[in-house]
Amino acid sequence: MADTIKMRITLEGDTAFVKVLMPHPMETGLRTDPKTNELVPKHFIQHVVATHNGRPVLDAQWSQAVSKNPFLEFRVRGAKPGDKIGVAWEDNRGENNALEVAIK
Amino acid sequence: MNARFALAGCALLAFGASVAAASPEEDRTAFVRTFQQRFPGIALDDYVHGGFMFSRASRSHYDDIMAFPPFLGDIERGKVLWDTPFRNGRTYAECLPDGGRNLAGTYPRFSAAENRVITFEMLLNRCRRDNGEAEYRYDDRATMGVLTAYARSLSDGMRMDIKVDGAAALAKYEEGRRLFFRRIGQMNFACSNCHLDNAGKVMRMETISPAVGQAVHFPVFRGGDELYTLHMRYTRCMMQVRAQPFPAGSEAFNNLEYFHSYLSNGLPLQASVYRR
Amino acid sequence: MDFDVASRPLRRRLLATCAVALAALWLPLRAIAADRNTSAFDAKAMSDALRSIGAADAIESDQVVIKAPDIAENSAIVHIEVESKLPGTQSIWVFAEKNPQPLVAQFDLLPGIDPFVAVRIKMAESAFVRAVVKADGKFWFAQKETKVTLGGCAG
């Protein structure tokens, strides 16, 4: 969980292809901890926002059924080198994380 | 098709009959020939993809996941271990030729001085030992697991080049070979029953991977995040056939890995990959 | 040091670095957060979930393109891509029809983004993966059957 968000951006023409990994356990609440034999509480990213130069371009709501260490890909139009792509998430416990990357 | 299986059957008989006689290179070419007759049209280099080599759809899904795989954090943790100097200030890179680049594909190696097989993971542990650090357990994902996942990535794509030179080395190779063909456990399965005789067939909704191409792509991240070194995978295989497994890092597994890796000579090393 | 083996095919095209973690980035974003449609996310039946987003009468369209595997190699990581070719696409939803709660994700598209998303999801069992698109106020969908298997081996 100490891992930070990872983002890769490739620019083709004026479209930025953005791939994101968000380290997070994404617990469904249905899994039993083999050590304690008790259900692991639901713990998942439920809200993700992507930005282009600070302006939101994508607003996503997720359930616990998004895979562990969630992957997200989106494509931003009108992008150019130096522009900044940001991703921020918040989970159902109110924890959050964010990353902003400049397109090279 | 029948003729093809008949040919494969002949090759299998040849294996059975030649436990002690075949040279490693004869073994390897016989395995490769058997598989290539059974699976015409699949390039040998694609064998590194294991069960995914049989299905374009599965391979495509694999490629989608590998385009940005969920286990990058584990590789990064391995890099941190690799880069962090020992208490004496030295590093793994200083222990190894060319900083450890293009090296993993030449392991396991036979050490004549010690009369034993040395795996790449043993090499990493020896570097630790020689620098006054405690050795890592071979089945510890958080240490040796991520360390070797990163260290092997420095050899990503290199062609496997395992050498078996001399009678003493051949003896270890033969020990590994015997384990590969030995039926074990309550299920009475040998490695060869699945990964030679039945490779390409479906068992429990899994397409069984051929023995050629297996030893080049570990550690794998099963389900995208659960790290298995080759020895951890051997352990799991043995559990699945209900045998008492050898421990990761045991001499039996080292010898098995020696034989098993030789079968993949010439194939490009992959580090690290997703498996289901 | 270029260790990022998994990205090998992308390495040469990799353009972005200079990553700076900006925990504070989140705060201004919260202001624009859409309200979560909890009744849709909590719905246990596909029909209820569709009704909750207003898509009960969605029409199947070849202008919605969904990519999902025929057989999921692992039910915990099923790579899904959805692209809408419909003008005025506003939102994309992804459902796994037989999950305990079928709605997996809702993506509200804002100006400046292509009508495309890729995401990896967990599937409880073999099912249709359905993509619903809202475009110019109307609902459309596409679906793809994905079989999931409970495996024992992998090498």
Image (cartoon, rainbow, N blue to C red):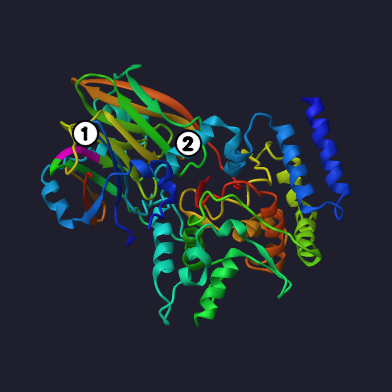
Q: Are marks 1 and 2 on the same chain?
A: no
Name which residue type carries label 2: His
Name the residue at 71% across, 45% down: B195
Name the residue at 79% across, 59% down: B174
Q: Position of residue C96 (x, y in %)?
A: 40, 34
Residue sitting nearer the eye, C122 or B51: B51
Name the residue at 44% across, 42% down: B65
* Lateral position of residue B275 relative to residue A77, left or right: right
Residue sitting nearer the eye, C150 or C100: C150
| Secondary element at tag 2 | helix
Q: Is residue B185 visible?
A: no
Residue sitting nearer the eye, B12 or B86: B86
Badge 2: residue crowd in 10 Å (few <14, some 14–19, many ≥20): many
* Lateral position of residue C137 relative to residue B211, left or right: left
Quarter of the image for residue B218 reads bottom right
Q: Position of residue C137 (x, y in %)?
A: 18, 21
* Lateral position of residue C116 relative to residue B72, left or right: left
| Residue underneath mark 1 | C108
Badge 1: residue crowd in 10 Å (few <14, some 14–19, many ≥20): many
Residue sitting nearer the eye, A18 or B216: B216
Give the quarter of the figure containing the N terminus of chain C. Answer: bottom left
Residue A83 versus residue B151 in the image, above or below = above
Name which residue type carries label 1: Asp
Residue C130 versus residue B132 in the image, above or below = above
The tag on residue B189 is none
Name the residue at 82% across, 39% down: B11
Q: Is residue B28 visible?
A: yes
Magenta-tinted stretch = A56-60
The tag on residue B61 is 2
SS majority, magenta: strand
Q: Position of residue A95 (x, y in %)?
A: 24, 57
Q: Is residue B80 magenta?
A: no
